Amino acid sequence: MSMIQYQPYQTEDGRTIGNTLMEMKNITLRFGGVVAIKDISLDIREGEIRAIIGPNGAGKSSMLNVISGFYHPQDGEVWYKGEPRPQMRPYQVARLGIARTFQNIALFEGMSVLDNIMTGRLNHMSASILDQMIWWGKAEREEVANRERAEEIIDFLEIQAIRKTPVGRLPYGLKKRVELARALVAEPSLLLLDEPMAGMNVEEKEDMSRFILDVNDEFGTTIALIEHDMGVVMDLSDRVVVMDYGKKIGDGTPDEVRNNQEVIDAYLGVAHD
Amino acid sequence: MPDQFIFAMEVTLNGLMTGVMYALVALGFVLIYKASGIFNYSQGVLALFAAMTLVGIQEGRVPFSHLINAIFGTEVHHMPWNSVPGFLAILLTVVVMIALAWAIQRFVFSHLVGQEPIILFMATIGLAYFLEGTADLMWGSEIRTLDVGLPQGINTAIDETTYGWFGYGFFIDNLDIVATLVAAVLVAALVAFAQYTKQGRAMRAVADDHQAALSVGVSLNFVWILVWSLAGIVALVAGIMWGSKSGVQFSLSLIALKALPVLMLGGFTSIPGAIVGGLIIGVGEALFEFLVGPMIGGATQNWFAYVLALLFLVFRPQGLFGEKIIERV
């Protein structure tokens, strides 16, 4: 079913897909009696855009939350960069270089766009507290470098015009983009996007798709994303995992998945027995 | 110049200085409220606890000596050394306050994550009584004088200068001047900390959105311990100032009540608000007592601040600097 290749290879558009970056092995996640994820394994390779799709309630978000440390599975192992990852809190996962966005947007509403994006650089600050308070030496150099990086991302995502605007005042589509900017500015090795296109109109969806492709292309960032809109995902992703009722029902290239009977059934709503 | 006007100037100046002392206490409330949404009823007791610990360490007394003696039948009261220098005692007290912050987070608030604000508020009431009892048990309940070497008494320079100008010397207490300077430095340091340092920014991030803070690698637990430590240190500063002024005793914890109207005026979430609110209340109650007091029998300081706060609650509930509460329907 899956087409796991353990050698780096070139995609049609000339990007290099490398070794396995993250591997979920036989993950099972239960909430009381409800099984959200049932014995699922999947891998994410360096440089690829990996999608997890499925109908509502399929367990996609749970899977993303397991990767980012918000949920802890009862069974199974999470491997990252070739090593098993011990159980970690979300902030520890973030410090490992795994950045994420949220389906319902989690931004600092009281801060400006720029300040929001700068929080993504918190873990790139290592000068002493005193130096930072009086803006001196290493602290100043770090701050300048962080600011440069932030401006670079702001240019990249075309949000120069709103850099000083308080986030609380922005429309939904722009908030999504600011959240992406904050995740991106941390220079993550793995970027997790939770329904990046949920609630957007067609034009905003097209913009977001373009940014996701550009991020992957320009920075070589590995991206794992969740969507329930199948059409968008198929154009974006290198490989797709399909989930339904907590189980994996398909895994492969968009073409392979599209022709998978179980996937077609899940989406067209064939009765489960 | 009419005498009344000169007196009013002196009253205003003294009111400003008292206002700084109020602001010091209010600052501790604002810090915790901003970063964790907890209205910390125990802030005043925290100041009492800090002041008692400072005096105890300085006098070289053995903590929990009554308890130890009662259980083991011993007679320990005093450490082998005589007394500890003020500066060292303050440092040790800071260490105690940080340890206390850790314990508060570890044993109380880490179990209450995600609870309603009213529950967290009730927890701080419990904490206040617990700390009060602990402070009593640790250091005894006698009234003590606190002297860490701060200058006290009338400032003769100001007295002589103003006498030269108006033919009337102003009475300004040296301790009030020191308190003002210390408060200014403290606020500047707190602002620089919150704006520019990694830890300060993490603090603001947590105050704004927990989930977003987690996703950029901020440990909530660390930030909350940090916030309680800062509140403890601000409480220590307030405790030193008030303790030097009027002795270290139980009533010190009641200064928290004076901080409430300051917060109503300044807004619960604003550091500048706490300062301006403190100054307005300090000056307002001093001038009111001076101008209106004699007509209605005096002692207006006891209620003026609360009446002012009540008016603010009616006409501007978010305070002067607080965030406006907008309910979307």
Image (cartoon, coloured by chain):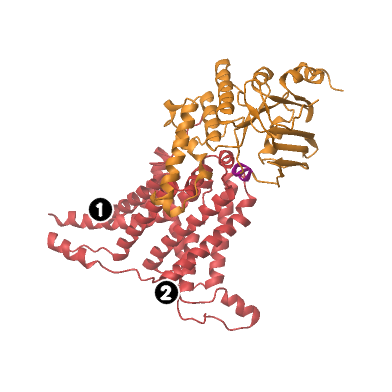
Chain colours: A orange, B red
Q: Are marks 2 and 1 on the same chain?
A: yes
Mark 2 falls within which chain? B
Mark 1 falls within which chain? B
Q: Is residue B87 visible?
A: yes
Q: Which residue is mark 2?
A: B85
Q: Which residue is mark 1?
A: B291
Q: Is residue B126 visible?
A: no
Q: Residues within 10 Å of mark 1 (few under 14, many from 20)?
A: few
Toward the viewer: B219 or A171? B219
Toward the viewer: B184 or A45? A45
Write the start and end of the magenta stretch as one range: A90-95
Q: Residue at x 80, y 18 (%)?
A: A265
Q: In the image, is residue A92 part of the stretch drawn in magenta?
A: yes
Amino acid type at mark 1: Leu
Query: Residue B247, percent across and down?
Result: 41, 69
- Does residue B166 lie above or below B148 as drawn? above
Amino acid type at mark 2: Pro
Q: Secondary structure at mark 1?
A: helix
Circle count:
2
Toward the viewer: A271 or A130? A130
Kindly indicate the quadrant of the structure image that contains residue B164: bottom left
